[in-house]
Image: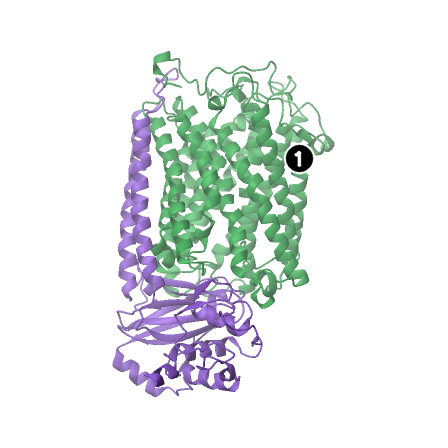
Amino acid sequence: MDEGFKLFPDQASTMAREVDWLFYFALAVGVFFSALIFLLVLYFAVKYRRRSDDEQPKPIFGDVRLEALWTVIPLGLTMVMFGWGTGIFFKVNRPPANAMEINVVAKQWMWKFQHPTGQREINELHVPLGQPIKLTMTSEDVIHSLYVPAFRIKNDVLPSRCTTLWFEATKPGKYHLFCAEYCGTKHSQMGGWIYVMEATQYQQWLAGGAADETPVEKGQRLFTQLGCATCHQANPTARGPSLHGVFGQQVKLKTGQTIVADENYLRESIVNPSVKITAGYEPIMPTFKGLVNEEQLLDLISYLKSIGAAPSKEDKK
Amino acid sequence: MPTKIFHTTSRPQPEQMTREHYLNVDYGIKSWLLTTDHKRIALLYLATITAFFALGGIFAVVIRLELMTPSGDLVQSETYNKLFTMHGIVMIFFFLIPSIPATLGNFLVPMMIGARDLAFPRLNLASWYIFVIGGSLTFTAVVVGGVDTGWTFYTPYSSSYANTHVILTATGIFITGFSSILTGLNFIITIHKMRAPGLRWFRLPLFIWAHYATSLIMVLGTPVIAITIAMVGLERLFRVGIFDPALGGDPLLFQHLFWFYSHPAVYIMILPGMGVISELVTCFSRKRIYGYPFIAFSSLAIAVLGFLVWGHHMFVAGQSVYAAMIFSVLSMLVAIPSAVKVFNWTATLYKGSISYDTPMLYAFGFIGLFTIGGLTGVFLATLGIDVHVHDTYFVVAHFHYIMVGGMIMAYMGGLHFWWPKITGRMYSEGWAKLAALIIFVGFNLTFFPQFLLGYLGMPRRYHFYPEEFQVLNVMSSAGASVLGVGYLIPMIYFIWSMRYGKPAGPNPWGAKGLEWQTPSPPPTDNFTKPPVVEEAYAYAPHTQEDRPRG
């Protein structure tokens, strides 16, 4: 990352290249039409300038064919951009299954990161090259937005909700991390750096930092401490549904509706358990709102993601 | 500047002012503050919004001065945040939204359709008073310390975290909204019921079509922002949980409601400007507009589609990817009628008799800058690109190309075009051309670098920024000072012309609208005898065969 003057940002992720290609296409279309309009206006303005005061040009009423032409061509081009842009957008919003998970908590005015191995960072994030990384993000107060221009990615970070973002870095270096959603007095200083390192260097870096309890370990400890396991057992007669392998699965609700158990569903079920009750169970779970903070919620979710299929099924086999 | 006006008219110039017209029919403060004449109300609005424009401009100057250096060293962060918030609020709610409709629209809607006044003259005066009350409240909020939520008032920051004057500012905006609604109602009813004999819908000036479409948005959209603001107030004052998740609310609900009005509001700001451009392009090329029905219907299409695209402000806000997809494709569609207008204006020039009077220079400027602003809008509607440039200076540059490069260019063009009609006098053409050129150059120098900054990744609303962005920011600030000078010059020669300008005569441009068939300044009743219309934009005699069928 050099600090000199430049016209285009660093290209440091797999997404950056794709977004730039689309941008160049849009730019080509934009420059073509701007030039067309400028030149036509200029040409007409000079060629048909008023030469005498009593000039009286013949009226022209219009031509439906021409109107159709300049409706259809821009429509076609915008549809190409729509299709292409939507393709990229779906990729941005679908993290690969093998992504390394990093938890992010935003607050006025700092970013807190925790690696799956437990290391914590504030306003800095070290990541390995060539490894998809998924950020699971939430906010403790207002809306923030995590933005890394060199990766061409951004997503808002909301209070009481999880949002995700993913990237795969392609170039080692130090890149800006910004908050892109206005969040109060020090909004412009709520930023830091992303350090992209070779995988081996990343391992060294991990070893050098004091590893805290990992999010999964902490989640597991909380799961026991809060007594979750008392009801959420693999046993079919248990008072609560088994949570083994629940993440990413379809859950049938009491209302007959089926939803996917994603981060937001798990989060809501902890702080507001009576909203979406799993079919076959009673709404007896108390709320844990106020008992667990945003970071602990992410830890619990990390733990739930980590536990695969129910042990009882394993036993039967 | 009403004071200036009665000052001039109180001493009639011998060469012109013997005839009675709307300016000299009565004198004194009372005759202005209690007037129900749409032309005088237009001037009251003109004075009021000029004051707001100057206020918003001062905020912009301080912002650009601060951004000359990467470290926030001129003002505190809190002050900087208030500055961009109040710049946005003043410019959008108190200048851009009322700009053309409340001044030129007020003056011209009745005149262009051959009416004596708007349908409800007293309601029209009431709109101005409501505007002044709302404006005063928001201005008071500015004076007592300001507000720092951004003009977008995003929750839960605005409802639970900001400790600035949110309620007072929001109340001002809430009240001002009613002025918009009443003006819109007045226009719709006037256009439906008070057209001169022979003035069928497809003979209406396109300025009227644009104002009709604008009025629809004002009437249908403004109540939603009023409700939204009221809910922010409820949450802030009484802790009713609507938007703040800590109280059980949903912050995205706010964004949906806010943009449901505020996106159509963008079209409230630009459609009247498009109407002005249609009038300028025809007059200064002495031609009928090319593709009249396409321009007329494109205004309506923009008004309707404009209500269906609000979600494109929320592509990275956490809404569903499928919702984003729908909003993206609808946003692409709204670009089409805008493109159709630009092509038709350009085609109108073909084989015309084009003069380079000042209003036409502004029209040229508008077409160029609006084209850039519109095309970059397509970039933003493209999901993959928006993920990167959302909330960066790319967006800032885009909407300033539409609002300043488009709307203010059109407003300036319109003021120069109808100034002789409004005051009966000509401004200095030389100075006016110079100012138009300075504005064009200053504008591009200010805002073009911001596109580059945005793609490089500089987020908007940043007080401190990384050093590598300084060069482009200095360019932008330099451009802003040029732009500022460009806006000051017309203020001087317009005031000067009210007293010393050459008498304009009824129709200095050889234009064909009804407003030019009556003396300048017009009599209080607009027309001495009721006009009859046989043809729209009748710039040249032509045979029946030239006309399209239908």
* Chain shaded green: B
* Residue type pointed to by label 1: Thr
Asked if residue B410 lies left or right of residue B523, the reply is: left
Question: Which residue was labeled with disc 1?
Answer: B3
Q: Position of residue A106 (x, y in %)?
A: 48, 71
Q: Is residue B217 above or below residue A289?
A: above
Q: Could you tell me which residue is drawn at 36 percent across and 79 percent down?
A: A309
The front one of B289 and B262 is B262
Please state which of residues B297 and B162 is positioned toward the viewer in this rendering.
B297
The chain coloured purple is: A
Query: In the shown orientation, is residue B293 left or right of residue A291?
Result: left
Camera-side residue of A12 and B476: A12
Q: How is the image coloured?
A: by chain
Residue A196 horizontal/vertical position (percent): 31, 74
Q: Quadrant of the rendered structure where residue B297 is?
A: top left
> Where residue A71 sits in the image (x, y, percent)?
33, 35
